[in-house]
């Protein structure tokens, strides 16, 4: 047993028995994988949704956007609940909401109800940070770090696991069959959590800052709306810029609310710690680059040959391109805990950012053969896996156990916004590279986007190296 101070009160954490730990770890991984895969189901199904529900592609895109939005809002709320004594109840209730949302996506209801279901499914993204909190509280210290790193990786590669399977089901049985996959796996995740999730250590308490949650939701809604509505930037630049200013103001108001609150949604003062602030900055810029390359490759392989490039792959076959991403991402996640014994986490972040930059360089220089794109996707997966596995170590090194869920939840909000902006930036660059009357951009637009990605990963690398230098100076004054 280990004591952990929370608000001046000693809290005792109870690690589970070794036999229970063997069951707990797979359960944590499975739940993290399920919520990530289900939330990403909107990506391969956008075209199918537009066709099935007779809506525009822009409207169908919201099946992905609303899931990201609800996940971004739910993550800090659940992170705060996870810091209290009712963590098990919060996990079970959240999974119940996800299962209910999954049922709405399967039932023969209108498009509005499909969006409601996707909102409920997106809430599950907030569970990743809670899984980390459970691991840190109930596993031996020498093992919890590796498990937390793998949970972080699994939450990333979940999209690569769900994408091809959902696309195949959509081709065979329609969009309802694809969403049926989400219902089955989320029900299994709920049963798994009910059987395996332990209670949180006694002596903790947590209250949700409702005002902060509402303001954060409004700010994130604007950010994700601006990220998804690419036509707004090209046709109504002044309106888009005005909304961006409003979003920034709302975020500033949210920070003020959090600083004044006795029980903030996110401990902003802790976020200002140089290690945490540097890690979140690296996550934000790196997230933009990582998702940009993922978007570029998946879009490139589906471009028909008539555009002068591309491979004209179906949605399912294009999803198979993500397999190297998932496999090598998992391999990197498994290797990172061993490497961490010799290399500091900030240096691992920097090295992983360099690897992702190498994926961009490979895509920019060689994409005439499908094997080259598989290679670029594998390099991306390895870099993202290493980056995701190293990130928790940087943040949790200066975070008490009781605040694990809250600290990591903020990092995941930053990641979600970075991913959304990466997708939007890719869309804007490709749209700008499309000539008048042309449906597809010029091939050179992909090269331009890749160069932008290289720049983003260079900034991420420099940020991580600066963080490493600061951590080294604090360790060796």
Image (cartoon, helix red, strand yellow):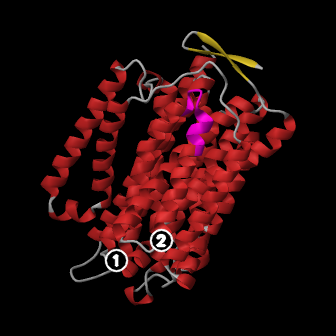
The location of residue 449, given as percent across then percent down, is 39, 63
**Labels 2, 1: front one:** 2
Residue at image point 43% right, 46% down: 72
Residue 149 visible to an observer of this rendering: yes
Give the residue number, with chain letter if any, for mark 2.
107
Distance of mark 2 from mark 1, alpha carbons? 41 Å
Would residue 242 be found to the left or right of residue 465 on screen?
A: left
Quadrant containing the C terminus is top right
Side of 216 where 101 appears, left or right: right
Residue 56 position within the rendered picture, expressed as x and y whole percent measured from the top left: 30, 75
> How crowded is the residue under tag 1: few (<14 C-alpha within 10 Å), some, or many (20+)?
some
Point out the stretch of residues depicted in magenta: 82-92
Q: Which mark is residue 442?
A: 1
Q: Is residue 466 visible?
A: no
Q: Using the image, determine if residue 8 lies above or below residue 161.
A: above
Closer-to-camera residue (365/350): 350
């Amino acid at each position: 047993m280990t004591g952990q101070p929370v608000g001046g009160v000693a809290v005792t954490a109870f690690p589970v028995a070794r036999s229970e730990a063997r069951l707990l770890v797979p359960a944590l991984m499975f739940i993290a994988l399920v919520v990530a895969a289900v939330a990403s189901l909107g990506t391969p199904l956008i075209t199918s949704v537009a066709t099935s529900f007779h809506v525009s592609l822009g409207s169908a895109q919201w099946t992905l956007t609303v899931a990201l939005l609800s996940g971004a809002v739910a993550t800090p709320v659940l992170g705060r609940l996870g810091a209290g004594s009712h963590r098990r109840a919060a996990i079970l209730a959240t999974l119940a909401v996800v299962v209910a949302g999954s049922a709405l996506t399967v039932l023969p209801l209108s498009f509005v109800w499909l969006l409601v279901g996707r909102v409920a499914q997106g809430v599950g993204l907030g569970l990743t940070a809670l899984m980390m909190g459970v691991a840190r509280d109930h596993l031996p210290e020498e093992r919890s770090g590796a498990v937390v790193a793998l949970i972080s990786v699994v939450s990333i590669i979940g999209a690569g696991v769900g994408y091809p399977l959902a696309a195949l089901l959509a081709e065979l049985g329609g969009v309802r069959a694809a969403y049926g996959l989400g219902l089955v796996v989320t029900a299994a995740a709920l049963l798994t959590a009910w059987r395996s999730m332990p209670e949180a250590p006694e002596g903790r308490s947590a209250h949700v800052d409702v005002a902060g949650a509402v303001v954060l939701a409004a700010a994130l809604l604007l950010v994700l709306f601006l990220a998804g509505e690419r036509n707004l930037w090209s046709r109504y630049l002044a309106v888009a810029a005005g909304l961006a200013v409003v979003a920034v103001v709302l975020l500033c108001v949210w920070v003020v609310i959090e600083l004044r609150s006795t029980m903030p949604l996110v401990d902003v003062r802790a976020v200002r710690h140089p290690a945490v602030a540097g890690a979140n900055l690296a996550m934000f810029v790196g997230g933009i680059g990582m998702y940009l390359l993922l978007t570029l490759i998946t879009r490139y392989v589906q471009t028909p040959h008539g555009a002068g490039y591309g491979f004209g792959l179906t949605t399912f076959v294009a999803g198979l391109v993500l397999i190297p991403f998932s496999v090598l991402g998992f391999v990197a996640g498994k290797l990172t805990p061993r490497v961490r014994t010799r290399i500091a986490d900030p240096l691992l972040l920097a090295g992983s950012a360099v690897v992702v930059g190498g994926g961009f360089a490979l895509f920019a220089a060689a994409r005439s053969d499908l094997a080259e794109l598989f290679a670029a996707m594998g390099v991306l997966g390895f870099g993202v896996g290493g980056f995701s596995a190293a990130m928790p170590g940087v943040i949790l090194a200066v975070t008490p156990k009781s605040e694990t869920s809250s600290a990591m939840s903020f990092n995941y909000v930053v990641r979600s916004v970075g991913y959304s902006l990466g997708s939007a930036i890719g869309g804007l660059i490709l749209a700008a590279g499309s000539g008048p009357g042309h449906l597809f951009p010029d091939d050179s637009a992909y090269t331009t986007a890749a160069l932008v990605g290289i720049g983003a990963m260079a900034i991420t690398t420099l940020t991580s190296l600066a963080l490493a230098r600061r951590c080294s100076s604090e360790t060796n004054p």
